[in-house]
Amino acid sequence: MKLIDKYIAKTVLAGILIVLLVLVGLFTFFSFIDEIDEIGKQRYGLWQAIQYVALEIPRHIYDVFPSAALLGSLLGLGLLANNNELTVMRAAGVSIVRIAVSILKIGLVLTIIVMLIGETLAPMSGQYADSMRSIARSEDANQQVGFSRYGFWARDGNNFINIHTVFPDGRFGWITLYEFDNAQNLKAITYAKTANYQNGSWQLQNVEKNIIEPTQVTRQYLENTTWEAVLNPELIKIVLVRPYKLSIFGLAKYIDYLQENGQRSVQYELAFWTRLSYPIVGITMIFLAIPFVFGSLRSVPVGQRILFGAIIGIGFHMLNQASGNIGLVYGLPPIFSALLPSTLFLIMALLLMRRVI
């Protein structure tokens, strides 16, 4: 049985890797096409575009793996079926359940590997790619353009902070801090030319502070001052990245920050639960291929199986997107919106599997 396990795993693995290579290649090619229009802006040249596209490859692997798992499994099992190898295995007393277990073993290993890529390499390379691209396209060589034209806004308790510029060395420029009391009355407005984060607090330099009182406004000029805040540079780096590019840890950290400050975190919670459901999605896609090979598609060519798998993959993607958007609009629990598509497809796979056993 170990020999059969290895043979099935080898065939399915080859199918998944071939499809994964093709899909990642297509996504990378289209990403490079999108970047061609940006080449020539400031210091963003051909080499920078190639670097950016290459650094996005780990994220493409993470994004397309569920589809590649379904298509690759259909391809590998389809070849075994067309060569009558599955028939021979069944005649030798190997049950469909035993074959399914062999397939799911390699599927689980691949899912764990891809998930590790998505939680470690993909966020780091993606953030570096965005940072490199922003710096190369900025008009000022010392400036990282990662904000909108109004800068970056954040809330910290009763305070609101606006940061206009982030420098590559980690410093911040042109900071405005608005301080309010518990009655939401403006107490002070502080302007700082630069700031850096040290030992858990913000160190502001070249500061102008306006203290607002009922009868007067007092202006102070300080060379340096300290500001204690929950907000830190790591959170700023997190919020500059779209939710789907963040790791589970990054999402959890930023969700805690938003909830501590009474801000809406549903979008990030949806991304968090979607990432947690990734193993279910990967295994479901592989499991879904089994009944189609042994069931109604057992006598059709491999090409038709691939086409059918592509339709299933597109359907899952559309349902996943629709479920998330509907959940955000109607205020459904993020965990429900994230798990609904994979749960429905898993139930469908189990029902189809019962028909072929």
Image (cartoon, rainbow, N blue to C red):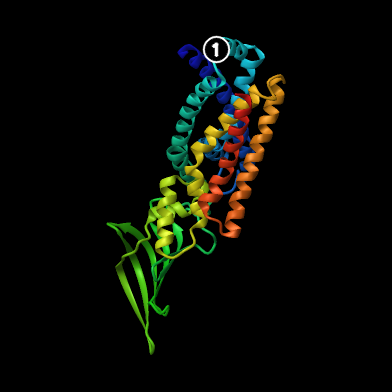
Image position of 41 with respect to 182: above or below: above
- In the visual, does 152 lie left or right of 211? right
Residue visible at 60% across and 29% down?
Answer: 354
Q: Position of residue 63 (x, y in %)?
A: 55, 38
Image position of 172 with respect to 63: above or below: below
Q: Which residue is mark 1?
A: 93
- In the visual, does 25 lie left or right of 5? right
Q: Position of residue 166 (x, y in %)?
A: 44, 56
Q: Position of residue 338 (x, y in %)?
A: 54, 47
Q: Residue furthest left?
A: 199
Q: Position of residue 98 (x, y in %)?
A: 52, 20
Looking at the picture, tell me which residue is in the foreground, 301 or 164. 301
- In the visual, does 31 lie left or right of 307? left
For disc 1, the neighbor class at 10 Å (few under 14, some 14 to 19, many from 20) is few
Residue 184 in sight in this render: yes
Q: Give the amino acid at mark 1.
A: Gly
**Mark 1 residue element:** loop
* Image mark count: 1
Q: Name the quadrant of the C terminus.
A: top right
Looking at the picture, tell me which residue is in the foreground, 335 or 11. 335
Residue visible at 46% across and 64% down?
Answer: 263
- In the visual, does 313 lie left or right of 51? right
